[in-house]
Image (tube, rainbow, N blue to C red):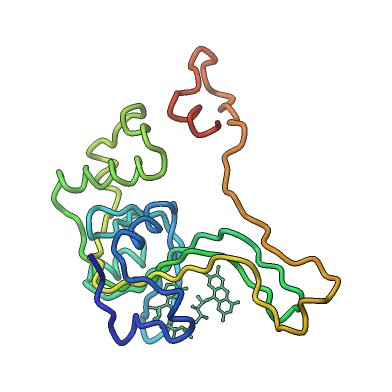
C-alpha cells in the first residue's frame, strides 16, 4: 500500500531518499512518542510539539480543552505534522558534507474532535499504550471528569511521505585523502535506571513491562 505522491509531498530534494510506502511511514510514526504539528492561524505559522498515537489511518492528539491547537484542529482546519527519528551524526571530511542519518515523516490531514465516549476512551488507550505498552492495564483509567476535561482530535492522514538517509558521509573525491576521521556516530535512544517516586510505597515493584525496556 502506497500513499499517493501529490504536488506537495513529491520530494524535490533527494527524491532517492523518499518513500510513500504506508508500512514504512507507519513504522516511523509508531516509533516516536511525539510529533510537531504546524498550522496557520490568522495567516501566521505555528509549530507545536505534542504527544501522538496512531489509530489505523488517523493521528490522535489530546490535551486540555483550552488548547488553541486542538480547538483549531476541531474546527476542521488542515495541519501538517512532522515526525523525526535521528539515527546518527554523519561526520564528513569537509564541514560542508556533514549530515545526519534519519527517518522522518511529513503528513497532511484535517481533523475533527472525538466526541463519542467509547471512541474517546479507546484513544486514551491508544495514547497510553503507545508511550508505554502495558501501562493501560496497570494504571487507573480515566474517569468521566478526566475524560470531559480532555479534548481529543483525530486527524485522517490524507497525504504522507517519508524521507530516509542512511550510510556513510559522501565527500568530494579530492577530500578522501584528508587525514580527518570520517564516519557515522550512531544515536541509540535508551531508557536509564528508573527513579522511584519518593511517595511510592516501596512494596510496589517495578513492573515487568518497564524491566523489559531496560535490557
Ligand atoms: C534530522 C534531520 C535533519 C535535517 N537537516 C537538514 C539540513 O540541515 N539542511 C537541509 O537542507 N535539509 C535537512 N534535512 C532534510 C529536510 O528535512 C528537507 O528534506 C530538505 O531540506 C528539503 O526541503 P525542501 O522543502 O526543499 O523539500 P522538498 O523536497 O521540496 O519537499 C517537498 C515535499 O517532500 C516531503 N518532504 C521533504 N522533506 C521531508 C522529510 N525530511 N521527511 C518526509 N517528507 C519530506 C514533504 O511532503 C514536502 O512537502 C534534515 C532532515 C532531518 C530529518
In x, y percent, where is residue 205?
Answer: 50, 18
In which image quadrant can residue 20 be found?
bottom left
Q: Is residue 192 left or right of residue 44?
A: right
Residue at 26% x, 67% y: name it: 157
Quadrant placement of the N terminus: bottom left
> Quick check: 58 above or below 129?
below
Which one is nearer the viewer's eye here, 193 or 104?
Answer: 104
Can you give x and y, in whole percent of width and height, for residue 81 in the image? 38, 69
Describe residue 77's horizontal placement relative to residue 177 as left or right. left
Residue 48 at x, y percent in the picture: 45, 66
Q: Is residue 32 above or below residue 118?
A: below
Say if 208 sits above or below 68 in the image: above
In the image, residue 105 above or below residue 201? below
Q: How many marks?
A: 0
Q: Is residue 157 left or right of residue 178?
A: left
Corner quadrant of residue 140: top left
Quarter residue 89 falls in: bottom right
- For the residue pair 100 and 93, the one nearer the viewer reads as 93
Q: Residue at x 39, y 71 (%)?
A: 106
Report the side of 193 relative to 137 (left or right): right
Q: Position of residue 67 (x, y in %)?
A: 36, 61
Q: Residue at x 41, y 44 (%)?
A: 131
Q: Residue at horizontal 16%, vertical 54%?
A: 115
Tell which residue pokes out farthest to the top in this image.
203
Image quadrant holding the C terminus, namely: top right
Q: Nearer the viewer, residue 13 or 214?
A: 13
Amino acid at each position: 500500500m502506497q500513499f499517493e505522491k501529490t504536488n506537495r509531498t513529491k520530494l524535490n530534494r533527494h527524491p532517492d531518499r523518499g518513500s510513500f510506502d504506508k508500512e514504512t511511514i507507519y513504522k516511523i510514526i509508531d516509533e516516536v512518542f511525539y510529533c510537531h504539528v504546524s498550522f496557520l492561524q490568522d495567516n501566521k505559522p505555528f509549530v507545536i510539539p505534542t504527544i501522538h498515537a496512531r489509530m489505523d489511518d488517523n493521528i490522535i492528539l489530546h490535551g486540555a480543552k483550552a488548547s488553541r491547537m486542538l480547538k483549531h484542529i476541531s474546527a476542521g482546519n488542515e495541519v501538517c505534522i512532522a515526525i523525526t527519528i535521528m539515527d546518527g551524526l554523519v561526520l564528513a571530511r569537509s564541514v560542508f558534507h556533514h549530515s545526519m542519518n534519519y527517518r522522518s515523516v511529513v503528513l497532511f490531514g484535517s481533523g475533527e474532535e472525538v466526541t463519542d465516549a467509547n471512541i474517546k476512551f479507546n484513544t486514551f488507550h491508544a495514547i497510553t499504550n503507545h508511550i508505554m505498552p502495558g501501562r493501560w492495564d496497570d494504571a487507573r483509567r480515566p474517569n468521566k471528569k478526566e475524560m470531559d476535561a480532555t479534548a481529543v482530535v483525530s486527524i485522517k492522514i490524507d497525504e504522507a511521505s517519508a524521507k530516509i538517509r542512511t550510510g556513510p558521509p559522501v565527500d568530494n573525491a579530492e577530500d578522501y585523502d584528508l587525514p580527518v576521521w570520517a564516519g557515522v556516530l550512531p544515536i541509540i535512544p535508551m531508557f536509564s535506571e528508573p527513579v522511584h517516586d519518593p511517595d511510592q510505597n516501596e512494596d510496589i515493584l517495578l513492573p515487568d513491562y518497564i524491566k523489559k525496556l531496560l535490557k
